[in-house]
Amino acid sequence: MNNIASVIVLFEKNSKSLVLTIRNPFMRSHPGEICFPGGRWQDGDQTLLDTGLRELKEELGIGANRVQLISAMEKEHTLTGYTINPWFASIDSIVPYRLNPGEVSELLMLPVNAICVSDNYKEIEFKRDGLTFKTIQFLHESKFVWGATARIMQQFCKTDYLNFLK
């Protein structure tokens, strides 16, 4: 299962926010970028959900027993050839949590009422290997999220997941 990853789109009920991380600036891939907790599938993972939950535990110290799985979300594909499998889950409070400094430099709580404002998104172009690509960016209070993570955030807002919040 090369080039397959899973992320946990974690909704904290107490703050009505999605939980994201800012990657360690020294990481080999995507240094300093904002993303959902998650990562690549590994041989010991029984399922793709297990991948996301293992990464949530590794990055934030939050065990599977503390989260309530709501639903699998639609897969996202990246320019680097990865298929990302997002899983929507909730937690009453992320406290206590423990950042893994080798992977995460900061925890970021983005309120759903900001994530679901269409004016916070716009299409951008960027160049890679001499080619021009288009993607989506989210910008709110100097927090810049782009690519697959921004698309997953949009997916969250355009589906019935918001009904869960009522």
Image (cartoon, rainbow, N blue to C red):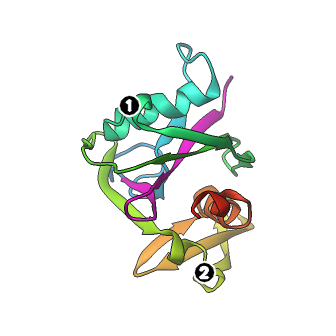
Q: In the image, is 115 to the left or to the right of 1? A: left
Element under label 2?
loop
Going 33% across and 48% down the picture, which residue do you hit?
94
Is 96 situated left or right of 103 in this image?
left
Q: Residues within 10 Å of mark 2 (few under 14, many from 20)?
A: few
Image check: 96 left or right of 43? left
Q: Which residue is mark 1?
A: 63
What quarter of the picture does the C terminus occupy? bottom right
Instruction: Give residue 49's position: percent from left, percent from top.
Output: 60, 30
Q: Residues within 10 Å of mark 1 (few under 14, many from 20)?
A: some
Badge 2 amino acid:
Val
Q: Which mark is residue 122?
A: none
Position of 115 relative to 14 (above/below): below
User: Does 158 appear in magenta?
Assistant: no
Residue at image mark 2:
117
Residues in magenta?
1-22
Instruction: Report the residue at 27% width, 48% height from top.
Output: 95
Locate residue 2: give its quadrant.
top right
Q: Secondary structure at mark 1?
A: loop
Residue at figure coordinates x 33%, y 47% from the top left: 104
